[in-house]
Image (tube, helix red, strand yellow):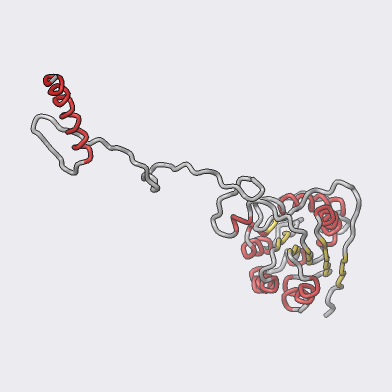
Amino acid sequence: MKAYLKLIAILLLPLAFVIWYAYSPVQIPPPEWKLSKIRIQTPSTSPVKGEKQLRPNKTNDSGQKASPSRGGLEESMSLPDTTAHRILFFGDSMVEGLLRRMNCYAYANGHTMTNVVWYSSTTEIWAQTDTLRYFLNKVQPTFAMISIGGNEQFVKDAAGRESFIRKILQELGDTPFIWIGVPAWKEDTGINDLTKRIVGESRYFDSRGLTLQRGRDRMHPTFHAAALWMDTVAVWMASPATAHPIRMDKPTDGRKHTYKTYALQPIRN
């Protein structure tokens, strides 16, 4: 019996030594051989450098996977805002063609529209009058759509329009908005690029790549072409490419819907 216990002790001693050395800060470097410490992984809340941690996917209240937020703008881009908006759509005569189809989108998605078409208007006119402020106070919009620049495509001082564009944005304040660019029929002198730079790509729909059938004046799209133009804009408005996507499901009833529209005549010098 004593021999048996002695044998067990002999076998346990090396094992005890290995376990002790694994956790001990002591390093033993004999000349003939070297012991390497065992790296025992213990649970930790900190990830190992260079190693990816798996985390459970967060979900929102509806059970859908939530997108990671990187601060404000990206968070709002995850899903379209389904709020029923009061939309103010204002600008030059290009608005006239777009608003017909936009009214249908508004009706189909629960939005209401107030349209302001100011014929022959420019960014300068909108910036230097109180018209925009009047309609903002009257409508109290929760979303704005802008289409101005058609009468400034060939101005010689496009860069000089920057202060006017910034004044319009200042009047809008925190109201979410989009700016629909001019569907150029010729190369402009810079108004599209200027507006896009100031407004930002996520709020500016660049219409220059579209091929649209024109009316008799060779400038304004036909009403049919303007409807197709608005269809393209609507897809973009509901997409993550915009700063504040809103619900813009395509109308399916085929009916025309009208909302309050103000037609302002050109300013006479």
Question: In this view, which residue lies farthest toward the right?
Answer: 255
The quadrant of the image that shows the N terminus is top left
- 184 or 127, nearer to the observer: 127
Residue furthest to the front in view is 1
- Residue at 15% x, 40% y is 27
Which residue is depicted at the point 87% across and 69% down? 263
Residue 157 can be seen, yes or no = no
- Picture quarter containing residue 77? bottom right
Q: Which residue is drawn at the image coordinates 86% and 59% (left, top)?
A: 217
Q: Nearer the viewer, residue 223 or 218?
A: 223
Image coordinates for residue 119, horizontal then vertical, percent: 84, 69
- Measured as percent of width and height from the top left, residue 201 is found at 63, 57
Q: Position of residue 63 (x, y in %)?
A: 64, 45
Asked where in the image residue 269 lies, by quadrant, the reply is bottom right
> Which residue is located at x 39 percent, y 46 percent?
47
Q: Which sits in the foreground, 117 or 72?
A: 72
